[in-house]
Image (cartoon, rainbow, N blue to C red):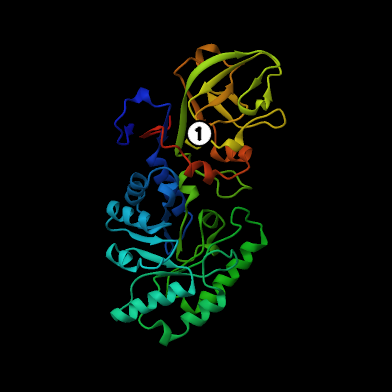
Amino acid sequence: MLFAAEDPFHTDLYGGRLTIDLEAIAQNWRFLKSKLTDNTECAAAVKADAYGTGQEPSGRALFDAGCRTFFVAVPTEAISLRQTLPDATIYALNGLLPGTADHYLENDIRPVLGSLVEVRDWINLCKSAGRSFDAAVHVDTGIHRLGLSPDEFSATLSDADLMGPFVPSLLMSHLACGSTPDHEMNGRQLELFREITAPYAHIKRSLANSAGVLMGHEYHFDLVRPGISLYGGQAIETEINPMKPVAKVEARIMIVRNVPEGDTIGYGARQTARRHLKNAVVAAGYADGMLRSASSSDDRAGGFAMIEGHKAPILGRISMDMITLDVTDIPENLVKRGAFVEMLGPNVAAADLAAYAETIDYEYLTSLGQRFRRVYGPLT
């Protein structure tokens, strides 16, 4: 059963629709959980509006499936999620910005402390209250983004006078090369994380993202935090993606027209018709998350869409509001004005489009346009 997210407009006023399968998200979470031992918790990353699928409905679906711990990026996401999930444990990955501690406490949000100054600010907060407030401590094992250095981590956590009443609720790090399991960086990070956190085995530990879940038990520790895999994305580049697709983008055909051989198509005249073509112009563009870098030209093939099982290559540049597709060899009854074209979904994987755009499927999913009519239900 389909149901629409709140919107004030008639269906026909939209240039396209975005269908999101919440049950598929829940099934993906259950699949990842099945990879774990009973001693490891399966959390969920719902940052960036749950990777474009909607934080509130996706968060509820995951909670109903059994997930109890959630990760977002920034405090505003965390506070919004708290309104949706009053009983969940919520971590904010981007840490503790100046002047924000009271907001974390008021909304029962746990910051992931990613620098020495953040850890010390939180310790002082705990000391002034005479009690420990829940927070994670992030240690950098080689990605060189957020996180205490290994030396800072060891020196701080081993100093009882400095730590005072503060006991972290979670110790975590982040894999730099999980998408390529054979990369030597994974083993180095695993060994370093295991070594420096060993004295604190009584505290929950977390290293694995989606790729880490699929890489095996040694990466799992006490809690895993999958993200892209929940939303059907391909976490490991070298393996067949086992996850169910959860999103489908369809755009309406606005016009079907003929292009004589030798004429050019789109901005910049970058693509020339090598034969007499029939093209369909659809109401989707880079403003809707269809990345411009997947454009086609005389020098390189671009992405594609699907029309009832028929592949429709992109012609020329993707523009802000429209894309031109080659429908020359597709039956005329399938390419009528007003018909829907699958731009992303079960038959057009985000990972496939990302390869044409020289990016990753994360970017497609988190860029899904706000101009489409958003509905929730099965993708078929």
Q: Could you say where residue 296 lies in the image, as x and y percent from the top left? A: 64, 30
Residue nearer the viewer, 59 or 292: 292
Residue count near mark 1 (Cα–Cα under 10 Å), binned few <14, some 14–19, many ≥20: some
Q: Could you say where residue 282 lies in the image, as x and y percent from the top left? A: 50, 24
Look at the image and tell me in which quarter the N terminus lies. top left
Q: Residue furthest bottom?
A: 161
Residue drawn at (55%, 19%), measured in percent from left and top?
A: 280
Residue drawn at (32%, 56%), measured in percent from left and top?
A: 79
State left or right for residue 357 relative to residue 284: right
Q: Amino acid at mark 1?
A: Pro
Residue nearer the viewer, 4 or 214: 4
Visible residue check, residue 167: no
Image position of 52 with respect to 150: above or below = above
The residue indicated by pointer 1 is: 346
Q: Helix or strand or loop: what does disc 1 sit on?
A: loop
Look at the image and tell me in which quarter the C terminus lies. top left
Image position of 128 with respect to 369: above or below = below
Residue nearer the viewer, 102 or 68: 102
Residue drawn at (54%, 23%), measured in percent from left and top?
A: 309
Q: Could you say where residue 252 lies in the image, as x and y percent from the top left? A: 46, 23
Q: Could you say where residue 95 lies in the image, as x and y percent from the top left? A: 43, 65
Image position of 22 with respect to 124: above or below = above
Count of labels in the image: 1
Residue nearer the viewer, 279 or 222: 279
Visible residue check, residue 307: yes
